[in-house]
Image (cartoon, rainbow, N blue to C red):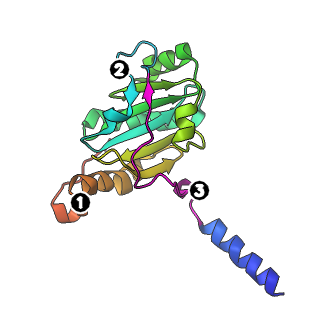
Amino acid sequence: MLAFGVLALLLGIGLSLDPREVPSPLIGKVAPQFDLPAVKGRSQGLATHDLMGEVSLVNVFASWCVACRAEHPVLIALARRKFVAIHGLNYKDKPDDAAAWLDRWGDPYTRTGADIDGRVGIDWGVYGVPETFVIDPQGRIAYKHIGPMTEEFVHDKLLPMIEELRNGGRPARESGAAEIPLVR
């Protein structure tokens, strides 16, 4: 009977967890070293040194990813606001497909690296696509979001987190930072 109670408790805890909140051993650590060539048709690849000096996002995406297509308008809108640098890590994709996808749907990325064999994704602990990493000005991974970003996530969690990182850990409300509307 006790074993059943323990199992029920563990099941209840497991069901209450958000699958997008998978812990990453890389949180708080400097991003793994990498140097990727640009996606076909783009001029700037992506490397570890590109993630230093400012808060930025690294969005892991692929042309074959249905959820990436659903997330893409949110990234386009965020990029238009010029609030944060968004870098793309194109994961396990064919060069022509990646280029055609960005040409068709728009390119929100400041830099886009082609991780054709997926080795950089493995180093970053990528489970699948899309995933988005928030990088602090020292090049450390501050947060990992699994799955497509929504407008609600961007407004409620991402923008305040970016402001907090820019303000040395002070929450956005204390810093006097205004909310940045995305699409509204």
Look at 29% across and 51% down and name the residue there: 162
Question: Which of these two is toward me, 23 or 173?
Answer: 23
**Residue in front for this viewpoint, 11 or 155:** 11
Q: CA distance from mark 1 to mark 2?
A: 32 Å
What's the magenta region?
A: 17-36
Badge 3 element: helix
Considering the image in quadrants, where does the C terminus appear? top left
Q: CA distance from mark 2 to mark 3?
A: 33 Å
Q: Nearer the viewer, mark 2 or mark 3?
A: 2
| x, y percent for residue 99 | 48, 16
Q: Disc 1 or disc 2, which is closer to the eye?
A: 2
Q: Which mark is residue 19?
A: 3
- Which tag, 2 or 3, sits closer to the chain's start? 3
Q: Earlier in the sequence, mark 1 or mark 3?
A: 3
> Measured along the vertical axis of the image, is residue 118 above or below residue 133?
above
The answer to whether 40 appears left or right of 7 in the picture is left
Q: Which mark is residue 44?
A: 2
Name the spot of residue 65 as percent of width and height, x first.
59, 32
**Secondary structure under badge 1?**
helix
Q: Quadrant of the N terminus?
A: bottom right
Nearest to the observer: residue 89 or residue 49: 49
Q: Amino acid at mark 3?
A: Pro
Residue 86 in percent (x, y) is at: 35, 35
- Residue at x-position 37% and y-position 35%: 48
Seen from this angle, which residue lies furthest bottom? 1
Q: What residue is disc 1 on?
A: 172
Is any part of residue 176 visible from this angle?
yes
Do tag 1 and tag 2 residues touch (Cβ < 8 Å)? no
Magenta stretch contains residue 33: yes
Q: Amino acid at mark 2?
A: Gln
Three-letter amino acid code at the position of disc 1: Ala
